[in-house]
Image: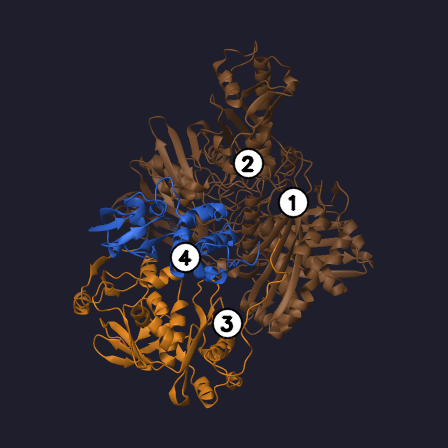
Chain colours: A orange, B brown, C blue
Amino acid sequence: MYQTEYKRAGSLNEAAQLVAASGGEGKYVSGGMTLIPTMKQRLASPSLLVDLRHVEGHKGISVSGKTVTIKGGTTHAEIAASEELKSVVPGFAGLAQLIGDPAVRHMGTIGGSVANFDPAADYPAALLAMEATILTDKREVAASDFFLGLFETALDENEIVTGVRFEAPESSAYEKFRNPASRYAMCGVFVAKRGEGRVGVGVTGAGASGAFRWTEAENALSGRFDVSALDGLAVDEGEMISDLHGSAAYRANLVKVVAKRAARKAGASGGPEVSGPKTPGGDAP
Amino acid sequence: MGVEGIGASVLRKEDRRFITGRGRYVDDMTVPGMKYAAFVRSPHAHARIKGIDVAAAKAMPGVIDVLEGSQLKADGIGNLICGWAVNSKDGSPMKMGAWPALAFETVRHVGQAVAVVVADTKAQARDAAEAVEIDYEVLPAVVEGPAALQDGAPQLHPEAPGNLVFDWEIGDAKATEEAFGRAAHVTKLDIVNNRLVPNPMEPRAALGVYDPAEEHYTVWTTSQNPHVARLVMSAFYNVAPEHKLRVIAPDVGGGFGSKIYIYPEEIVCLWASRKTGVPVKWTSDRTEAFLTDAHGRDHTTHVEAAFDADNKIIGMKVDTVANLGAYMSLFSSATPTYLYATLLSGQYDIPAIYANVKAVYTNTVPVDAYRGAGRPEATYVVERTMETAARELGVSPAELRRKNFIRSFPHQTPVIMCYDAGDFEASLDAGMKAADVSGFEGRRAEAKSRGKLRGLGMSCYIEACGIAPSKAVGSLGAGVGLWESAEVRVNPVGTIEILTGSHSHGQGHETTFAQLVSERFGLPVENVQVIHGDTDKVQFGMGTYGSRSGAVGMSAIVKALDKVEAKAKKIAAHLLEAAEGDIVIENGEVKVAGTDRKLGWHEVALNAYTGHKLPDGMEPGLKEGAFYDPQNFTFPAGCYICEVEVDPDTGKTEIVQFVAADDFGRVINPLIVHGQVHGGLAQGIGQALLEGTRYDESGQLITASYMDYAMPRAWDLPMFKVSTTETLSPSNPLGMKGCGEAGAIGSPPAVINAITDAIGNNDLTMPATPEKVWRAIHAA
Amino acid sequence: MTDVSMTVNGRQVTGSVEDRTLLVQFLRDNLGLTGTHVGCDTSQCGACVVHLDGQAVKSCTLLAVQASGSSVTTIEGLAPSATELHPMQAAFRENHGLQCGYCTPGMIMTAVDMVARHGAELDEKTVRDELDGNICRCTGYHNIVKAILSVAQSMQGSGEGQRIAAE
């Protein structure tokens, strides 16, 4: 890691001022689960790190009727364990439980993940599918206007993600097919069955430009919330990631397969029962 | 058997320090004045070094010195060598290219060390390493073994025209051709044994300390064989005279073969300590480990097997290209020859075998022995072939194997090895019973109802361990003998120290070796201390690899214990005024058989040291040493059965059951032996499903971290069903065969046989990633 | 250089570090607590897991300055006394859940955190899921899983709920 300077902000205002004064060389660090590894690899070298983890009031989950608000400093573990979330939008809590590993979930935050927009980040799939609103210290932005491309968001320089807000869907689920090495999503799909028959489908890990809404699948499932509605559909291979872990063609296949499974888990009819293998012969000697 | 003797699952003595964070690994060591090394490494797979400019780096904060290869050469530090001479079939010696510890003319793989920075802190050393400017002329690179042999391929070493290290053969070509001439069926397969990165969890490290007052060198290093390291560094690399060099391998966090070798970094740390006058520590990071630890496997093979009309296998032809990487690592020549082709007979009575192995240089990390070393490659060839043949012949894979098993011993194979004992049918039966093979078709049908493809595959492996009879390996080109040494020191109070040339880096020697004492004298294992890993303490040793610590290392201890017992009995006989032949030692007491006359063990020990009442002419003391040279290899064997479910939509394979039925001969500690099998299975399953080392065409390693190299996680593996059958090895006093590598040797073909059974397509390479399996399903 | 102060294994400690110093470096190099290990560069192997304010975190992915003011428990601070073991430490030994010992401190710290969150409800699938961030190259995880389940099961005071499929 290159030399850097660390400062701990007490408020979002203070944090923004510190980074603004750094002349473009400063970065916010929240859980640091992406930034610190990147700095260790010497692939990032911010001269200043401003820690948001101790900012008062930057953490917390509130549910009001169907409206869910999660503050930026809330960790994945807190989201996964939240009884409120589990009751109103279990699919989203379940997604958080599948992020990284327990140690990562204890540190990593939703604000950091949303601001970074890694192509394999999990939250964006859900936030897109639920048409969530991204909250910053300056404004509110619709998720589809916020996530622009690989590691590219609508955030202005020095702008801080302060949270996300969304309407809890009637039902929702996230399915994730992991990269066997990194264990990040090679394909993750969030299906949200929302009011008035509208269905949202967000896909992460597969798209060459980051997470995206699969609108054809949304339309198909909105018309008929049955897994078979996806049968004739396909995503464009040309827009998929292709790397040593999976070609674009394979990822395109995954998107469809995983989407079907997420839909099924979210309550769509049809499709095979999801159950695990039986262990032969009972217990071993 | 006592409660802590042979056959008892004694909990490990060494665990307490590891579970409380008190293990002592090389990177945990500090000495006064210690500084840190960072290596400057080649970013190119193949390049000529036109110039090195260290001026900017030397001016960086905290930098003590920056050293380069020309200085190393000027100081007379020798090139790294391969210690096993293998000749080509035309009689010419292998072509060993020069490998300096720091490159100064040419770099031949990404990550090769070119210079070293010594600085006050690790971070400063690394900062300065980035400031070393090297002017490279980039040369074309080649990374695949077969490609390196083609006309026009980039040439690596002037010593090796055509990149050919050797073109070696074994077996009887004529007899084999004759067998194929009368074959009723021939099975042919093209096989790639994927390149693996060993990845012990402790990265390599070295701390070199030069003491100018004594002109003495000490190195703490992550080694499986510290004495071999000392010998090679003194006799061949001219780092320090052997009597002025102490090598300490303290707690070592796994090795799996990769810590056998003497690498540039420990040589450089010692040399740099002399040059700079400060102790120099280097600790690899994980990406450095990927770029510099010896890799494993990387064979490309064509195999043909001939069967007669009765489905008896009558001949086998094997043609292998072994990719050795950019340089010949210490035992790199033996792995794809004498540790590989000598096992191509498998468990089967094959009258004629011929194998040809071409070893080649490529612009990749050097390849050497990795857990199993040659034997996994042989097992994969044989067991994929048997399974494929069974499918082609329309017979049960188990029955084809059973029909061809060797049933009488000793059995001389056509490829050097003489199997001395075994019962292959017993392992097969045990495996099939544990796996409930008879119920498989029902399970397959049930899985189908859930949309899953279920498959079953087996592998009946044999390996050669107990490496090795010195005369035998000497005749095959080994530069060293492969015996082992031990010393048993009985202290005046009766406690015992065992000094062994074996080295434990996870195998539990501190416990199993102590169990031998418990068995022999009835003393608690707590009274026994096992000492290893320090050339100043242990007389000599060849170290731990090739599952040799039991069959060879413990045999040496047994020999030393024999001598201790004999002397103790003489002393006791004298003290008790009895005949020596009437003395028995049990439960920590030395008794006259059939009487109540006895001494405590500690009383005999004390008398040995006071010398007051010893028989006339007897030397005082109770301490004996022994060297043990094995009479033959040992031959662990077994049957592994894997059952998988494949998701046809994603190609993802889940291992739903894995059965291992092994014959390791005598088992000293079942708990530890089962643990060895579990770990070996994980590495073998890792090879089959997950681990693939990939270079791009320019020679960049694109799987250089855990982000891209898939290590087996808990989630990838099932609970294993492990059991043992037992035929004793006649070649050593305990009847042991060795258990350290079996899991990694036997499991890959079982997994691939299971997947190909599930998907109905035999054309599948390792690692069987979800995409490959998915494509194979849709190609079928 | 920045002054940091934190509670480590119940003891107040201070130190002066570069801001780029990782918590694991501070623990190992400044405090001599070498039980916490480094096994990778990419926050995946878990050899460095410690507890930060009671939760398992990767000390290789946290700056020492980030941890200033916090309470840290390392493997050296887990046992209740010099002569007693924490139940998880004992279970790893009794089940032969370690071989070379290098991943072991991180494994145990992860396991303690896991059992604290799941208690007796822990099953084999969850254990394997939650070991996703801890790599062991020696044991094939078999005995690690057994060790963790044995501690979880002991929390409900009986052998009921045996959830291991084999051996």
Residue that appears at 65% across and 32% down:
B733
Q: Secondary structure at mark 4?
A: helix
Check contact, mark 1 vs mark 2: CB within 8 A: no
Q: Is residue C91 left or right of residue A12?
A: right
Furthest-front residue in this view = C157
Numbered tag placed on residue C115 in the rendering: 4
- Depicted A61 relative to depicted B625: above or below: below
Q: Earlier in the sequence, mark 1 or mark 2?
A: 2
Residue that appears at 40% across and 71% down:
A95
Q: Residues within 10 Å of mark 3 (few under 14, many from 20)?
A: some
Q: Are marks 3 and 4 on the same chain?
A: no
Q: Secondary structure at mark 2?
A: loop
Numbered tag placed on residue B636 in the rendering: 1
Q: Name the chain letter of the residue that bears numbered label 3.
A: A
Q: Quadrant of the C terminus of chain B?
A: bottom right
Q: Residues within 10 Å of mark 4 (few under 14, many from 20)?
A: many
Q: Nearer the viewer, mark 2 or mark 3?
A: 2
Numbered tag placed on residue B4 in the rendering: 2
- Depicted B126 relative to depicted A16: above or below: above
Q: Are marks 1 and 3 on the same chain?
A: no
Check contact, mark 3 vs mark 4: CB within 8 A: no
Q: Is residue B626 visible?
A: yes
User: The disc labelled 3 sits on which kind of residue?
Assistant: Ser
- Depicted B506 relative to depicted A110: above or below: above
Q: Are marks 2 and 3 on the same chain?
A: no
Q: Is residue B370 visible?
A: no
Q: Name the chain letter of the residue that bears numbered label 4.
A: C
Q: CA distance from mark 2 to mark 3?
A: 55 Å
The foreground one among C158 and A149 is C158
Q: Which residue is identified by label 3?
A: A247
